[in-house]
Amino acid sequence: MVIIIALVIGLICSSLIVAAYFYKAQYQQKNRYDQLENNLYSGINILLSSEDTTYTQEKTLSLFNNDADSLTLKKTVWGIYDIGSVRAFIQKDTLYKTFSVANVIDSSKWAAIYLVDEDRPFSLSGKTTIRGDGYIPKAGVQEAYIDNKAYQGDKRLIIGTKHVSAKTLPALNSARLNLLQQYFASTFKGDTILPKKDSLQQSFLLPTHFFTFKKRVQTLQNIHLGGNIILLSDTTITIDSTAVLSNIVIFAKSIVVKSGFQGTCQLFAIDSIHTEPRCVFHYPSALGILRFQSTASKTQELLFIGQSSTINGAIFTYEKTVNNLKPSITIGKHTKIQGQIYSQGMLQLKDTTEVDGSVFTSLFFYRSTFTLYENYLINTTINSKALSPYYLTSDLLPVAQRKKKILQWLEAN
């Protein structure tokens, strides 16, 4: 009987010791996890607040002069945005996050419309609505009767504070333009053909996966490309509606997007971007024409958005040397832009187009059957108040504050 009682007591004591050990291990693990999480967010704040360019190369540091609290930080240029990668580790325990970074909008520079002053008035016709601050020519804004359409909007014409615009647009950020220009130099080495498998996802913790097609015309179809992938081409890339693109970046001479496409991507071309009807670009996407060399081509830069499409993000044109043929952006009928349009040249907003955000342009144009009208808007809505208060912009565009925030969480463990 004594032996049995002693055995029972021994088992109870052993269980208590095991339970205490297990509890201690769990407690220490929870403490390590909390410490890692705190370190991780400290690293995120360092990347958001730092202007140090050395973070473009992976950098390891100790937060508290203690090797037990280590961070690996990296900031990668990703089109008009940046990608931050932070890894916190203590011994064999690791947490990481990758995220895109963008800038807060500067409310003092924000406006529904900015139209360069070329010493002529700005005219509105049909059911046109402009809601928000407006920078317009000194000649002012007026009603117009075009194509049997009289002005039917608010009698204030611009529902917001009016300012006099300058002779030129506020400039794009030269530092960001220089970063984009590097990708058109085509010195990057990578795969020359797409994988035969139908899906490729590259982590932002790994090196960027480049595809360099050079002079070979390429069509993306029946494939899903996502993450840390950049496509480069010296000619045309066509994106079929069967392609699914998630946060990748494309640089090419010209880009064609087929009707019905849906995805999130940044497209940059030298000559033209043409999207067919019913395309949807999810936030944060970007479509930009960039011409850094005046001798690259004598053709006009064209950015065309097909009718009944939705663009969530930024649309812009830029040329380093001004030519007689100004860059042109055309937004098709029944199309909605949620974000920003920056046109260094001409901008055509066709009937029933809607911009929830801002429009900066050197010139509006409207083409009827027989006539081209300059600085006219007909049946168009521009509403800066309708843009989400959580919308973040790129430091490329002239309304960006220096303050940065997390645009999108991409990967975590």
Image (cartoon, helix red, strand yellow):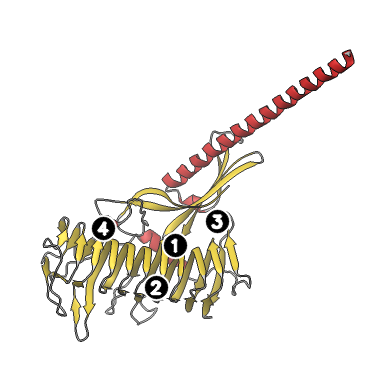
Alpha carbon distance from label 2 to label 4: 23 Å
User: Between 327 and 50, which is closer to the camera in this rendering?
Assistant: 327
Alpha carbon distance from label 3 to label 2: 31 Å
Which one is earlier in the sequence, the residue at label 2 or at label 4? Answer: 2
Alpha carbon distance from label 4 to label 3: 33 Å
Alpha carbon distance from label 3 to label 1: 14 Å
Which one is earlier in the sequence, the residue at label 1 or at label 2? Answer: 1
Q: Could you tell me the amino acid type at mark 1?
A: Gly
Which one is earlier in the sequence, the residue at label 3 or at label 2? Answer: 3
- Quarter of the image for residue 28 reads top right
The image quadrant where one finds the N terminus is top right
Q: Could you tell me the amino acid type at mark 2?
A: Arg
Alpha carbon distance from label 1 to label 2: 24 Å
Alpha carbon distance from label 4 to label 1: 24 Å
Q: Residue at x 35, y 77 (%)?
A: 301
Badge 4 marks a residue whose secondary structure is: helix
Q: Nearer the viewer, mark 4 or mark 3?
A: 4
The residue carrying mark 3 is 204
The residue carrying mark 4 is 384
Q: Residue at x 39, y 60 (%)?
A: 176
